[in-house]
Amino acid sequence: MNLSQKKILLGLTGGIAAYKVADLCRQLVKAGADVRVVMTSGAKAFISPLTLQALSGNAVHDDLLDPNAEAAMGHIELAKWPDLIVIAPASADFIARAMAGMADDLLATLYLATAKPIALVPAMNQQMWANTATQDNISLAKKRGLQIWGPASGEQACGDVGLGRMIEPFEIAQKVDEFFNHKPLKGQHWVLTAGPTVEKIDPVRYLTNRSSGKMGYAIAQAAANLGAKVILISGPVSLACPLNVERVSVESAEQMLAAVKEAVANADIFLACAAVSDYRAKQSSDRKMKKQDDNGLQLELVQNPDILKWAANEADCYCVGFAAETDNLEEYAKAKMQRKGIEMICANDVSRSDIGFGSDYNELAVFYQNAGQLKQKALGPSLKLELAHELVIFIHSIIKS
Ligand code: PMT
């Protein structure tokens, strides 16, 4: 395990498993990481800050309102400092406070103030873990892109047996190592499109669709997490740019095509997840179009360029498309794959309200060419963030095969 030059912020909350984190801290430091520890008041009831100060070699942070600590490294500076934040043990109370956006102690404030990747390592009584409130908070944490490591099952300090034990320090250290060093896509360059396009009719009206960008952004995040250089060409959405991803913001299909042409030159993969408007107004007006007295408006539409088809024909990279269908999923997706000249297409049923447009979940039927045969793989239903990770790993395995 090599964690040299890695900056890890270790957050401890109140729970008996806190005593095990001394060993985790020792292992991370031994692997070369620079570790800073933040403790809640609950954590300090289970393990002394002095122990963690001695093991990490750095003063422990535990007070949001301590002027001396703030002068040394203020909480905003501390939130920007790490490459990874590991919260172990993460109590039910801490997870609930974090998900509610509370900033009532230093650790919860850091959670709110950071843009860095965070792993929660839950540890609690099995009934507390099973409680719907905790499960809802865990689902929310996953949706927000946090990693959840564990919990494990077994005998608990309180005598109960079940799911809720913190995974062991060596397992947490392994996951930290995996986070930094398992980068199968390192050296690869991915270009993605995501979100809707917006086709102007006049300064206040436009043609668009219901794409939220969630699916494409999740894929961009997954590819970046696995080590790829990622350029995300995005239509207008209300999502933050994923970590370690370069975003190019566009509005119309023509702008998206121009951005793709520029970005795709050295790409290994082009993945088109954007819901591109097939048509735009033949003429858009610079002034608001006034309502006429007669009973209608004729809007002449012309076809937009097909970005994916352009990439399949002109760019020297593996092209993956999406197919948004409401019926005949398989037939239409396969036809689209052929028409556009691509080797893989991910079909999703956008007539369903539980997946597809706007949802946090999706289910894909992936059709792909492999060894001269057309094959199929089912992915999901699952959270788009989890599905994206599986899809990226799958694309990588097909390209390598
Ligand atoms: O954004 P979300 O709310 O998370 O929803 C995700 C999604 C449903 C938008 C996504 O999973 C999806 O299906 N994206 C593709 C939507 C789409 O436009 O599908 P299509 O069947 O119309 O297009 C087929 C493929 O050609 C797509 O890869 C599309 O990006 C591409 N295309 C289409 C038209 C065009 N002019 N240029 C293109 O590149």
Image (spheres, rainbow, N blue to C red):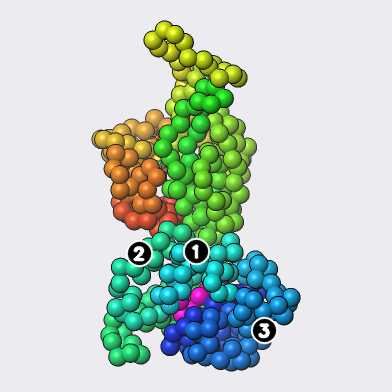
Residue at which label 3 appears: 58
Residue at which label 1 appears: 101
**Segment tinted magenta in the rendering:** 85-90
Determine contact: label 1, label 3, CB under 8 Å.
no
Picture layout, residue 274 above or below residue 5: above
2 or 3: tag closer to the N-terminus: 3
Q: Which residue is painted at 55% across and 54% down in the image?
A: 242
Q: Nearer the viewer, mark 1 or mark 3?
A: 1
In the image, 61 versus 176, the foreground residue is 61
Q: Which residue is painted at 47% across and 83% down in the image?
A: 14
Q: Quadrant of residue 336?
A: top left
Q: Quadrant of residue 137?
A: bottom left
Name the image quarter holding the N terminus: bottom right
Residue 212 at x, y percent in the picture: 45, 43
| Amino acid carrying mark 1 in the image | Gly
Is residue 179 visible to us here? no
Picture layout, residue 316 above or below residue 145: above
Answer left or right for 190 relative to 334: right
Q: Is residue 86 magenta?
A: yes
Label 1 packing within 10 angstroms: few (<14), some (14-19), many (20+): few
Numbered label attached to residue 136: 2
| Amino acid carrying mark 2 in the image | Asp
Q: Which residue is painted at 58% across and 36% down in the image?
A: 250
Residue 398 at x, y percent in the picture: 42, 52
Picture layout, residue 207 above or below residue 387: above
1 or 2: tag closer to the N-terminus: 1
1 or 3: tag closer to the N-terminus: 3
